[in-house]
């Protein structure tokens, strides 16, 4: 499937989930959430565990903020309804993002950005940042390990707090070399040279995209007509 | 990238800068700053600290290159955070842009030039960030921002205050503490930055940004 169709489907899911009437919205979000957790990962990056943890945290915080009446020391029905509505927003956003992340490869995203004629420096900036993230994470682990081996203690809060500037400075200074290397790489790739850019992957439309577009159109018409959506 | 309007340029000439034109080092640096914002979350998680420090990169890029660079770095970090950890982070792009614009503007008033100024302007940044992110937290996510400030929101809401007020009262102190620490970290990083690297940034900006 074309990545643009995936984005359209995710948008369609979000719109349907946020506009549907009471039992339908929960059904749509629950099925979307289950599907996004169940679907296989094509991209090689699966944040399902982190997302599940954050979603549970969000629901717990919403319960504490709205679900309890602290004066009556009981659950508040009105608050639980607000919690349900907000929980739906969180869950639909988490489901749509998880599905997009699991199903869209980086090469597809790059090819899509080229097809959309997004300026090359912007595209490169995004992909460089994505490239830097695992490098920084690895460097952070290395630096903290080096600090602990050299006797920097992190036994209590104050010591851990003092360890922060030292660790950050080591990470920053060690990454400066990689920034220089990265800039040389960018220069050698000729991102400022005018003309059409190519990507390894050629995006193609298939019958699945046609079906996705038709399904989205059907849902949007249902939303406009108001049945079964509000 | 879209060009800012001439009126905006007149108001603030730093918008004339085009960080994505010409210098590959600047592009790499902005990308690094975005990744640093994301990586800081990992670092504070490993050190088990109750802060988030997710604007170190935004402030560095804004102070060293300009508001557009800072905003790009902040928005990019929010996008990466939303696809890797918290999908709701994308809603706080406005806060990242505001932090970038304000911190770039504050360099005219000695922001990051010395410790005292860093603390003072860090406090102001915290208030601005707290005020901008509060309506998003209150109206879009009904009070749950998924950071430490939520505990304070619960406390103030339990006292019977309205949701927006609870979010503001909970968010401003945590944001102020976070931005003061972030500013201090940026101050130390700039102070330790080698001259060879500092030479990559425009003369006027590095003179106002580099701590004495």
Image: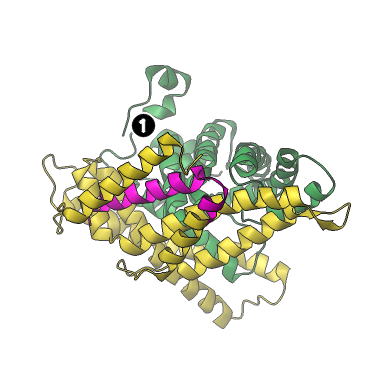
Chain colours: A yellow, B green
> What residue sits right under mark 1 in the picture?
B17
Rendered position, A83 above or below A51: above
Residue B37 appears in the figure: no
Tell me which secondary structure the magenta stretch mostly adopts: helix
Q: Quadrant of the C terminus of chain B?
A: top right
For image coordinates 50% across by 34% down, the residue present is: B101
Is residue A107 found left or right of B208 in the rendered image?
A: left
Give coordinates of residue A68: x percent, y percent. Answer: 78, 55
Q: How many marks?
A: 1
Answer whether residue A131 is magenta in the image: no
Question: Which stretch is magenta?
Answer: A1-26
Q: Quadrant of residue A128?
A: bottom left
Q: Quadrant of the N terminus of chain B?
A: top left
For image coordinates 46% across by 68% down, the residue present is: A48
Give coordinates of residue B162: x percent, y percent. Answer: 77, 39
Front one among A43 and A133: A43
Give coordinates of residue A156: x percent, y percent. Answer: 72, 73
Rendered position, B9 above or below B18: above
**Helix, strand or loop status at disc 1:** loop
Answer whether residue A22 is magenta in the image: yes
List the single residue furthest toward the left.
A195
Front one among A206 and B1: A206
């Amino acid at each position: 499937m074309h990545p643009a169709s995936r984005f359209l489907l995710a948008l369609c899911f979000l719109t349907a989930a946020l506009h549907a009437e009471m039992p339908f919205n929960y059904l749509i979000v629950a099925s979307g959430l289950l599907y996004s957790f169940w679907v296989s990962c094509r991209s090689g990056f699966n944040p399902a565990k982190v997302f599940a943890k954050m979603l549970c945290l969000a629901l717990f915080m919403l319960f504490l903020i709205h679900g309890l009446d602290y004066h009556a020391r009981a659950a508040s029905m009105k608050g639980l309804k607000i919690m349900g509505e907000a929980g739906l927003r969180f869950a639909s956003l988490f489901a749509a993002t998880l599905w997009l992340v699991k199903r869209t490869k980086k090469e597809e995203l790059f090819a899509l950005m080229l097809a959309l004629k997004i300026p090359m420096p912007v595209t490169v900036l995004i992909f460089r940042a994505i490239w830097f993230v695992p490098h920084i994470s690895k460097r952070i682990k290395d630096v903290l390990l080096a600090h602990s081996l050299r006797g920097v203690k992190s036994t209590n809060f104050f010591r851990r707090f003092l360890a922060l500037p030292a660790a950050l400075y080591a990470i920053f200074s060690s990454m400066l070399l990689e920034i220089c290397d990265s800039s040389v790489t960018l220069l050698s790739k000729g991102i400022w040279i005018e003309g059409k850019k190519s990507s390894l992957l050629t995006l193609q439309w298939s019958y699945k995209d046609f079906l996705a577009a038709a399904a989205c159109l059907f849902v949007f018409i249902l939303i406009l007509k108001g049945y079964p959506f509000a | 990238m879209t060009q800012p309007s001439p009126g905006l340029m007149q108001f603030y000439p730093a918008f004339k800068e085009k960080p994505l034109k010409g210098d590959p080092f600047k592009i790499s640096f902005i990308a690094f700053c975005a990744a640093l914002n994301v990586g800081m979350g990992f670092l504070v998680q490993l050190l088990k600290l109750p802060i988030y420090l997710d604007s170190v990169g935004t402030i560095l890029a804004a102070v060293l290159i300009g508001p557009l660079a800072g905003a790009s770095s902040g928005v990019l970090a929010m996008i990466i955070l939303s696809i890797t950890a918290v999908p709701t982070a994308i809603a706080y792009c406005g806060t990242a842009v505001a932090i970038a614009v304000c911190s770039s503007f504050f360099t005219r008033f000695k922001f990051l030039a010395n410790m005292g100024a860093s603390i003072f302007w860090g406090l102001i940044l915290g208030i601005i960030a707290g005020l901008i992110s509060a309506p998003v937290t209150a109206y879009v996510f009904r009070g749950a921002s998924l950071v430490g400030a939520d505990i304070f929101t619960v406390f103030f809401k339990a006292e019977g205050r309205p949701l927006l007020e609870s979010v503001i009262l909970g968010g401003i102190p945590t944001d102020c503490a976070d931005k003061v620490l972030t500013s201090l970290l940026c101050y130390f990083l700039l102070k330790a930055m080698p001259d060879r690297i500092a030479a990559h940034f425009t003369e006027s900006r590095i003179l106002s940004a580099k701590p004495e």
